[in-house]
Image (cartoon, rainbow, N blue to C red):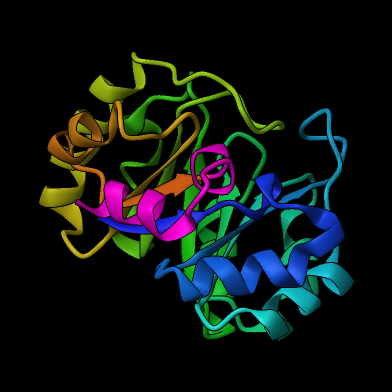
Amino acid sequence: MLVAPSILSADFGNLARDVRAICDAGCDLVHVDVMDGHFVPNMTIGPVVVSAIAKAATKPLDIHLMVENNSFFVDLFAPLNPEYISFHIEEEKNPHRLIQKIRSLGIKPAIVLNPHTPAEAIEYLLEGLDMVLVMSVNPGFGGQKFIPTVVEKIKRLKVLRDRINPACLIEIDGGVGSSNIELLKEAGVDICVAGSYVFGADDYKTAIDSLRA
């Protein structure tokens, strides 16, 4: 299990400190939530702040776009050389074109599924993806409770993934912690995003190790 702490739950007054701390604690990716106040009812950070995060991080960035006009935001963040850029299938009218664009920039493309969006919605896009991010809460805010019905969707997605593109990773985001990590691993999750669970812990390394174990 790879662990990608979400900086949405970090102390933004000490963001560089917290980013360095999770990297030193052994995280695999730094998950960055970008919200525009239109696709979701919240706003977070732009390229200036993410650039500062990139400078502080010693692990690759995993940028999750929760925005309208995905292509515009891809252009904004591509110069920071993230490992992944993920976009919501619910918002994108030309997903295949955007997948090709992200890959042409030397970045691994990923698609996000909201809790209500079935795995089958991206069946014909899976071949071109490096990752699928499954939301287990409604996007927009940290600290929400895990939606249990998402587990069955992950199982269906794993069947599709194994048949079409076994190299594509499955990531989960929302309400992840020690109480459900084993269930998620058994369902087929490869990467877990954890915000409150990691940043709310007394010791980041202990929290990250508990998810990985």
Query: Does the image show residue 75?
Result: no
Q: Is residue 69 left or right of residue 4?
A: right
| Residue at 77 percent of width and 31 percent of height | 40
Q: Quadrant of residue 46?
A: bottom right
Give yes or no for residue 5 being in the magenta stretch: no
Report the quarter where the N terminus lies.
bottom left
User: With respect to residue 168, does 52 lie above or below?
Assistant: below
Give yes or no for residue 206 being in the magenta stretch: yes
| Residue at 58 percent of width and 41 percent of height | 200
User: With respect to residue 100, does 142 lie above or below?
Assistant: above
**Magenta region:** 195-213
User: With respect to residue 109, does 157 lie above or below?
Assistant: above
Percent x, y for residue 88?
A: 59, 43
Of residues 12 and 122, the one nearer the viewer is 12
**Main structural element of the magenta stretch: helix, strand or loop?**
helix
Q: Is residue 155 left or right of residue 178?
A: left
| Residue at 45 percent of width and 21 percent of height | 146
Percent x, y for residue 71?
A: 73, 62
Percent x, y for residue 142?
A: 65, 33
- For the image shown, how many numbered marks are present on the structure? 0
Of residues 14 and 99, the one nearer the viewer is 14
User: With respect to residue 34, does 56 lie above or below?
Assistant: below
| Residue at 72 percent of width and 55 percent of height | 70
Query: Does the image show residue 17?
Result: yes
Q: Is residue 45 left or right of residue 106?
A: right
